[in-house]
């Protein structure tokens, strides 16, 4: 068993055997810069709307959650990569701000569905418009070039 383990750990995954070039590092650095620039823009826009970045992300997750039925607190926790109790506290704050309402699940009394209120919808719509405009204005062309450079460098 021990020999098998050591053999398994010494095999190199196919993708890591490729040599990294300076252009790869430059593309990754530029990609991370573009992401951080967009996130900084988005965080500032959220602050102007009176929201924290996490509150904005939660609203986006609740509205944009893709599956049958409304989002739950557990879904928010998974979407934000946080623990369930942290998501509960976040949803409590959003409910106190009258941005989110809780609805009992008619099929399971232990579950609570989340829905944006009219005020929550308005704030999210305003932020989403600003974010999409910023992506179209600045990040989209740069990200397109970066993604193309990733494809080219992975083929070489």
Image (cartoon, rainbow, N blue to C red):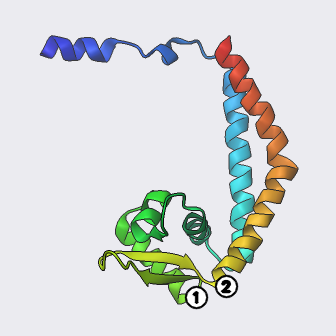
Decide if residue 72 is on the left or right side of residue 148. left
Residue that numbered label 1 is attached to: 98
How far from the left and from the top, in percent, is residue 63?
60, 68
Kind of element beneath mark 1: loop
- Name the quarter where the C terminus is drawn: top right
Give whichever of discs 1 and 2 has the lower sequence position. Answer: 1
Q: Is residue 27 above or below residue 19?
A: below
Neighbour tally class for label 2: few under 14, some 14-19, many 20 plus, Cα within 10 Å: few
Q: Position of residue 132 (x, y in %)?
A: 78, 58
| Nearest the eye: 110 or 141 | 110
| 13 to the left or right of 143 | left
Name the foreground residue: 69 vs 89: 69
**Residue at (73%, 53%) from the top-left corner?**
38
Q: Measuring from the top left, give residue 48's x and y in whole percent.
A: 75, 76
Q: Can the viewer see residue 21?
A: no
Q: Residue at x 69, y 47 (%)?
A: 35
Which residue position is annotated with label 2?
Answer: 119
The answer to whether the residue labelled 1 contacts the one labelled 2, judged by CB atoms less than 8 Å apart, is: yes
Spatial CA span between label 1 and label 2: 7 Å
Q: Residue at x 42, y 70 (%)?
A: 73
The residue depicted at 74 percent of the width and 44 percent of the height is 34
Query: Considering the numbered disc 2 on the image, is that residue within a helix, a strand or a loop?
Result: helix
Residue occupying the far front of the picture: 107
What residue occupies the far left of the structure in this picture? 1
Displayed quadrant of residue 62: bottom right
Percent x, y of residue 36: 68, 50
Compared to residue 29, the image places residue 45 above or below, namely: below
Q: Residue furthest right?
A: 137
């Amino acid at each position: 068993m021990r020999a098998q383990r050591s053999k398994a750990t010494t095999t190199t995954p196919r993708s890591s055997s490729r040599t990294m070039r300076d252009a790869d590092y430059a593309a990754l650095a530029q990609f991370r810069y573009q992401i951080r620039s967009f996130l900084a823009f988005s965080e500032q826009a959220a602050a102007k709307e009176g929201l924290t970045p996490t509150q904005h992300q939660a609203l986006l997750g609740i509205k944009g959650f893709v599956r049958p039925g409304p989002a739950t607190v557990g879904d928010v926790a998974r979407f934000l990569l946080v623990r369930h109790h942290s998501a509960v506290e976040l949803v409590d704050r959003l409910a106190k701000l009258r941005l989110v309402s809780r609805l009992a699940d008619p099929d399971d009394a232990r579950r609570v569905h989340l829905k944006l209120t009219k005020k929550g919808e308005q704030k999210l719509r305003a932020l989403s418009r600003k974010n999409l405009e910023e992506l179209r204005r600045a990040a989209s062309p740069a990200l397109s070039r970066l993604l193309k450079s990733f494809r080219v460098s992975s083929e070489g």
